[in-house]
């Protein structure tokens, strides 16, 4: 089996996980309410801008403070809070999976 097949199997496993299924359901709730969808989209755009902007450290700190304030406000809306928390849970799950893969490769490289 090649690496692409394994990656496709991993993606399928992730899509069948409770974390992904719950996130997908929460996204449907957001998507059916145009006001909520707009708020989430704007928040994600601001987040992406910070990540890809190449701003100075000081500017990033200012933008992060603004983003944190926006997050606090959005978190007061139950549907958005649920969606963002589930998104975070899936992100942590994916980070953990990556860590397992990376650690295994690192151990193997060190042992030879």
Image (spheres, rainbow, N blue to C red):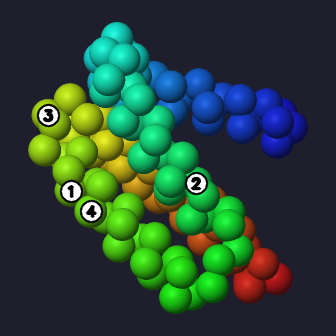
Disc 4 from disc 3: Cα separation: 16 Å
Per the image, label 4 sits on a secondary structure element best described as helix
Mark 1 or mark 2, which has the lower sequence index? 2
Is residue 104 among the parts visible in the rendering?
no
Q: In the image, is 28 to the left or to the right of 82? A: right
Disc 2 from disc 4: Cα separation: 16 Å
Mark 1 highlights which residue? Answer: 72
**Which quadrant, please, contains the C terminus?**
bottom right
Residue 78 disc label? 3
Q: In the image, is 67 to the left or to the right of 2? A: left
Label 4 neighbourhood size at 10 Å, few (<14), some (14-19), many (20+)? few
Mark 4 or mark 3, which has the lower sequence index? 4
Q: In the image, is 25 to the left or to the right of 75? A: right
Residue 48 disc label? 2
Per the image, label 3 sits on a secondary structure element best described as helix
Image position, residue 104 (x, y; %) = 63, 67
Mark 2 or mark 4, which has the lower sequence index? 2
Evaluate if marks 4 and 1 touch, with contact meaning CB atoms under 8 Å apart.
yes
Mark 4 highlights which residue? Answer: 69
- Along the viewing direction, whichever of 74 and 82 lies nearer the viewer: 74
């Amino acid at each position: 089996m090649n690496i692409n097949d394994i990656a496709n199997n991993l993606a399928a496993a992730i899509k069948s996980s409770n974390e992904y299924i719950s996130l997908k359901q929460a996204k449907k709730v957001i998507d059916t309410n145009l006001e909520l969808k707009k708020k989430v989209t704007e928040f994600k755009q601001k987040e992406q801008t910070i990540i890809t902007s190449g701003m100075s450290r000081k500017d990033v700190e200012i933008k992060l403070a603004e983003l944190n304030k926006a997050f606090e406000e959005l978190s007061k809306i139950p549907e958005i809070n649920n969606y963002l928390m589930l998104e975070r849970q899936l992100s942590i799950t994916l980070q953990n999976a990556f860590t397992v893969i990376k650690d295994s490769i690192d151990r193997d490289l060190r042992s030879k």
